[in-house]
Image (cartoon, rainbow, N blue to C red):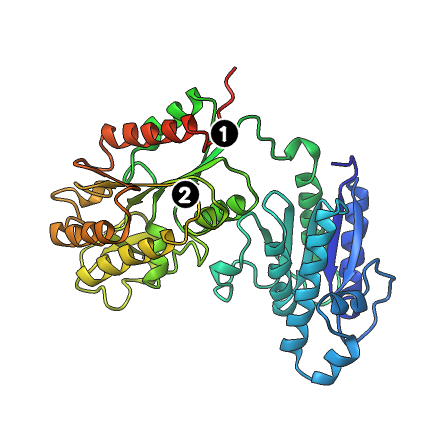
């Protein structure tokens, strides 16, 4: 990475020239370089961007006159978002940019989200938006490592408040691009999905075992955005193996919860042939935002408020089956080594006898779906609970076998 990081600066030059120039000035003052991309459609900017709006439209197979003739701002900006994303992805692949920053109202934010998603995790991304963290923003539009800041006092020119926001954002993205902040994988990395120890306790034993074998355990909190980050990094070939032991994001996705890891959850590793050890951790409850209230259809079910942000409703029998069927369907796409560990006595701490998710009939229904849908050659059944020591021992036994068979790269010890 160069000493002067190059930041792709994105905005509508016809309406945001003063703000874009303020970003450029701040980036230069902070020791970076700015590569300006104009994504406006109708007017002309009061500066000469390195990447013109015509270039952006062309990257989406369009022309500016064609987009203007449509007389539909939504379609036009969607096309510009496609072109901007294509160009940003190629610029990064060619080593021409180290980060991106974009600004806008709803229109510019909509476009910026696509560009951020087009760039790999680890590339610094900042969006300055009048709707940052708003209820208008769906979780699936947010890149897992995106930085956002509310454009307070912005949207029309530069004033004392909006300038402070612009300078803070520009300084943050330049600082995030410094070489000492870069991701360095000193040992082979293994992705692990998990929840906190109130629900799933295996990490306390699993991490030391992986470390002792010379692996870096990269743990992802299975609350939606964590799973999205994990899938993104799997797609970037960051891991030699995946221990996907907390699948609640998959069942949440299947049942319409807002706490979803998205369509790619539990699919990327399989499609790429990355070795996987999988277990159905925490698939007995449906997550929901505590502050939003119990979701329709779950009013009669037991619920557990984990905190003021997230709660879980006990699944119905049909929901239990549906969640297991979705897991089976996604695993059926796997092309690489797969081991599915099935703890017959329970999937998280809350489903033990006396716990809020305890439901022997529902648990048995899920077990039956897994037995029917997952090949016995890939399935290891344990007469134990997922939080028992034998579960972690079995995970590591299967891991060691995959290493011995040359399917997982060996670790790197001192």
Q: Secondary structure at mark 2?
A: strand
Q: Is residue 219 visible?
A: yes
Q: Residue at x 44, y 48 (%)?
A: 335
Which label lies toward us, 1 or 2? Answer: 1
> Of the residues under marks 1 and 2, which one precedes in the sequence?
2
Disc marking residue 238:
none
The image quarter in which residue 320 lies: bottom left
Residue 60 position in % (x across, y down):
70, 68
Residue 33 position in % (x across, y down):
80, 45
Q: Secondary structure at mark 1?
A: loop
Q: Residue at x 81, y 43 (%)?
A: 29
Disc 1 designates what residue?
409
Marks 1 and 2, how far apart in space?
25 Å
The image quarter in which residue 183 lies: top right
The image quarter in which residue 263 lies: bottom left
Residue 291 position in % (x across, y down):
34, 58
Residue 120 position in % (x across, y down):
61, 48
Viewer-proximal residue among 304 and 225: 225
Left or right: 300 with respect to 332? left
Left or right: 68 with respect to 181? right
Left or right: 237 with respect to 23? left
The 10 Å Cα crowd at callout 1, few under 14, some 14 to 19, many 20 or more, is: some
Q: Residue furthest top?
A: 414
Count of numbered tags = 2
State which quarter of the image contains the N terminus.
Answer: top right
Q: Residue at x 59, y 53 (%)?
A: 148
Disc 2 designates what residue?
221
Viewer-proximal residue among 240 and 195: 240
Viewer-proximal residue among 412 and 256: 412
Q: Decide: is 287 above or below 68.
A: above
């Amino acid at each position: 990475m160069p000493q002067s990081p190059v930041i792709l600066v994105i905005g509508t030059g016809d309406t945001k020239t003063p703000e874009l120039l303020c970003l450029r000035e701040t980036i230069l003052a902070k020791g970076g370089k700015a590569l300006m991309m104009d994504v406006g459609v109708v007017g002309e900017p009061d500066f000469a961007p390195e990447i013109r709006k015509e270039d952006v439209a062309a990257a989406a197979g369009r022309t500016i006159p064609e987009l203007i003739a449509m007389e539909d701002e939504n379609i036009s900006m969607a096309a510009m978002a496609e072109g901007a994303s294509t160009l940003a992805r190629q610029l990064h692949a060619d080593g021409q940019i180290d980060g991106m920053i974009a600004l806008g109202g709803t229109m510019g934010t909509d476009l910026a989200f696509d560009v951020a998603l087009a760039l790999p995790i680890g590339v610094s991304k900042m969006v300055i938006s009048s709707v940052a963290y708003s209820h208008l923003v769906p979780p699936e539009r947010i890149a897992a490592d995106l930085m956002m800041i509310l454009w307070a006092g912005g949207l029309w020119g530069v004033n004392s408040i909006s300038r402070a926001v612009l300078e803070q954002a520009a300084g943050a993205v330049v600082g995030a691009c410094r070489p000492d902040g870069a991701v360095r994988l000193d040992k082979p990395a293994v992705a692990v999905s998990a929840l906190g120890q109130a629900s799933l306790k295996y990490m306390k034993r699993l991490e030391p075992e992986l470390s002792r074998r010379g692996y870096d355990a990269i743990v992802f909190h299975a609350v939606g955005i964590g799973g999205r980050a994990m899938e993104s990094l799997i797609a970037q070939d960051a891991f030699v193996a995946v221990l996907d032991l907390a699948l609640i994001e998959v069942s949440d996705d299947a049942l319409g919860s807002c706490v979803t890891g998205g369509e790619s959850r539990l699919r990327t590793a399989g499609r790429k042939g990355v070795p996987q050890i999988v277990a159905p951790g925490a698939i007995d409850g449906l997550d929901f935002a505590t502050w939003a209230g119990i979701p329709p259809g779950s009013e009669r079910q037991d619920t557990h408020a984990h905190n003021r942000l997230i709660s879980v409703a006990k699944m119905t029998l049909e929901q239990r089956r549906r969640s297991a069927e979705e897991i089976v369907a996604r695993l059926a796409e796997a092309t690489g080594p797969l081991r599915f560990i099935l703890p017959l006595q329970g999937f998280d701490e809350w489903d033990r006898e006396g716990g809020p998710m305890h439901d022997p009939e529902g648990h048995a229904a899920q077990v039956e779906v897994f037995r029917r849908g997952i090949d016995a050659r890939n399935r290891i059944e344990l007469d134990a609970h997922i939080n028992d020591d034998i579960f972690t021992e079995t995970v590591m036994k299967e891991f060691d076998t995959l290493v011995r068979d040359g399917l997982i790269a060996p670790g790197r010890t001192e």
